[in-house]
Amino acid sequence: MIKLQDQREKHWEAFVGRCQACRACELSESRQNVVVWRGGIRAPLVILGEGPGADEDRLGLPFVGRSGKLLDQLLTSFGFDAGDYHIANIVKCRPPGNRVPTEEEARACRPLLKEQLRLVRPTVYLLMGATAHRYFMGSSTGITQARGIWTESNNCHILPTFHPAYVLRDPSKRTFLWQDIAAVRQKLEELDLIEKLKA
Ligand code: URA
């Protein structure tokens, strides 16, 4: 009998293959790599950014540049392990010059993102930055107003926050990102989806 874990890995590999073959929008023409995820392939928390930058495109992993270093520092200092989270983006291919992905590009990428989320089955979402918030929630509320406010949808808990790149540009916003990551940790603990940190 095929074990559940093996089956999950097979489905995941097939999904990654579909991502790598994707030509649904013109971002596929200029990419070096399709950037799908890092972290667990089944995780209680999904962290969603905008789209790959130059470092991510080169290495094929999300959030590995300056923003990613800050994110990793935060996740480590709040006691997260790589298996607790799954990091992905609204679009899987780098928009040239790091521009914001267009609505058409986000729409073209959505079926793959939906499939990804169906496989990962998160309960908590952290949306990082205005673009992730806008495209994921379909909301026109600015990120400054939206951040730190939980929304519940289909038994999932969704929290928008500032993008780490924004916090690097404006360090006065650091405490907001810190607060939001702490709130995510607390939510996962309350829901018994992650072990409580020992005092
Ligand atoms: N910024 C993002 O939004 N995503 C990445 O993967 C890297 C930087």
Image (cartoon, rainbow, N blue to C red):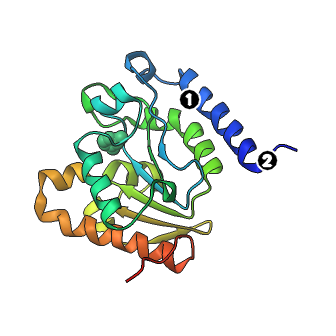
Residue at 50% in and 37% down: 107
Reading the image, the residue beneath label 2 is 3
Q: In the rendered view, would you say 175 is above or below 15?
A: below
Q: Name the residue under label 1.
A: 19
Q: Is residue 54 visible?
A: yes
Q: Position of residue 89 (x, y in %)?
A: 43, 43
Q: Which of 195 and 171 is in front in this view?
A: 195
N-terminal of the pair, mark 2 or mark 1, is 2
The answer to whether mark 2 and mark 1 are in CB contact below 8 A is: no
Residue 144: give x, y in percent of width and height.
25, 64
User: Callout 1, which amino acid?
Assistant: Cys
SS for callout 1: helix
Is residue 161 in view?
A: no
Three-letter amino acid code of the residue under disc 2: Lys
User: Furthest residue to the front?
Assistant: 198
Crowding at dot 2, Cα within 10 Å, few <14 / some 14-19 / many 20+, comes out as few
